[in-house]
Amino acid sequence: MIHDGPGLLTIGQLARRTGLPVRTIRYWSDAGVLPVVDRSEGNYRLYDAESVARLELIRTLRDLGLGLDDVRAVMAGQTTVAEVAARHVSALDAQIQSLKVTRAVLTTVAKRGSTAEEMTLMNKLAKLSAAERKRIIDTFTAEVFGGLDTTDPDIRTRLQFGIPDLPDDPTADQVDAWVEMAEMLQNPEFRRGMRKVIEFNAAGRTPATPPGTSLWFMSRLVQLAGDARGRGVAPESAEAREVLAELLGDADRAAVLDRILSASQTQVSRFRDLIARVRGLEQSPQYREEFAWVVAALRAELAG
């Protein structure tokens, strides 16, 4: 139909009325979001007053960052602005999260003076999707704790709290800690070592073992060894054997020594520190002097 009646606007007139460039209006028309109302005798596009309102809505939706597919669906009545806005909010949340992580990565790189290779690795690990990060954690948990949680209630507690994921708004230190932790989680040698530690701690325990027993033992060790050190008790002395007897009873001394040495491996200690940092907590005290005193006392008793 060729028509050039009153009330119709050429694309140039529509551009002047809305303040939008002619090329933008032409592009949106070609994309199907702003239909041409009619054609002039010279086959030029014509629009009406409704086109002005329609164009204002298109501009608003585009300014909000909506893609042409969403705009086209709204203009065609296939969806509502509210529905599209809700989807867009979710997309923006994901973009904001990604930008926060990127900012934290760059801050960490600047702080550490990282090389290009380190920066690439950090960015790759830190920007893993939540599902990918969960997969890394779940794989580690299954390999290290699998099958042991039925016999050791303390292991069930550890599984309940689990290994922390990267928070939604991470600091540079949390990203740094998460990257190092993720590398450890994916290291087969570290997983095998952790499995041995957990197996050793679970040995001899049953579902009837009271929860928190292993934690109680560690706190008791710190208390008794700290008191002995404070009193100047030498690890090789007879008094040290009395302290061990109070702490261990008739437990196998060699097995206890192996357990303490396994639980205090450098990597395990580092892993605990990283977990605390990812959680945004202060690193827990290591009580190295107290553990060293007990180790020395056990070795002296075993040697004598």
Image: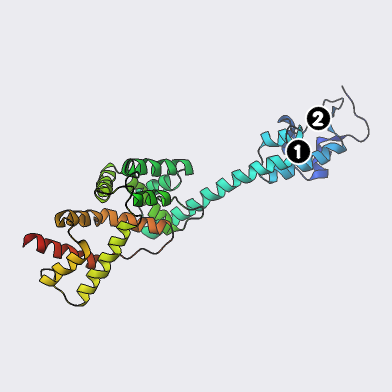
Q: Earlier in the sequence, mark 1 or mark 2?
A: 1
Quadrant of the image occupied by residue 229: bottom left
Identify the residue at image location x=26%, y=43%. Answer: 192
Q: Which residue is mark 1?
A: 22
Quadrant of the image occupied by residue 65: top right
Q: Which residue is mark 2?
A: 36
Amino acid at dot 1: Val
Mark in the foreground, 1 or 2: 2
Q: Callout 1: helix, strand or loop?
A: helix
Identify the residue at image location x=81%, y=38%. Answer: 12
Dot 2: few (<14), some (14–19), or many (≥20) neighbours within 10 Å? some
User: Toward the viewer: 258 or 16?
Assistant: 258
Quarter of the rendering occupied by the C terminus? bottom left
Residue at the outermost bottom position: 231
Identify the residue at image location x=25%, y=55%. Answer: 263
- Please indicate whether residue 13 sits to the left or right of residue 276 in the image: right
Amino acid at dot 2: Val
Residue 262 at what x, y percent from top left? Answer: 22, 53
User: Toward the viewer: 48 or 176?
Assistant: 176
- Please indicate whether residue 192 sits to the left or right of residue 127 in the image: left
Quarter of the rendering occupied by the N terminus? top right
Quadrant of the image occupied by residue 258: bottom left
The answer to whether one can see residue 287 in this image is: no
Residue at the outermost left position: 304
Identify the residue at image location x=27%, y=45%. Answer: 195
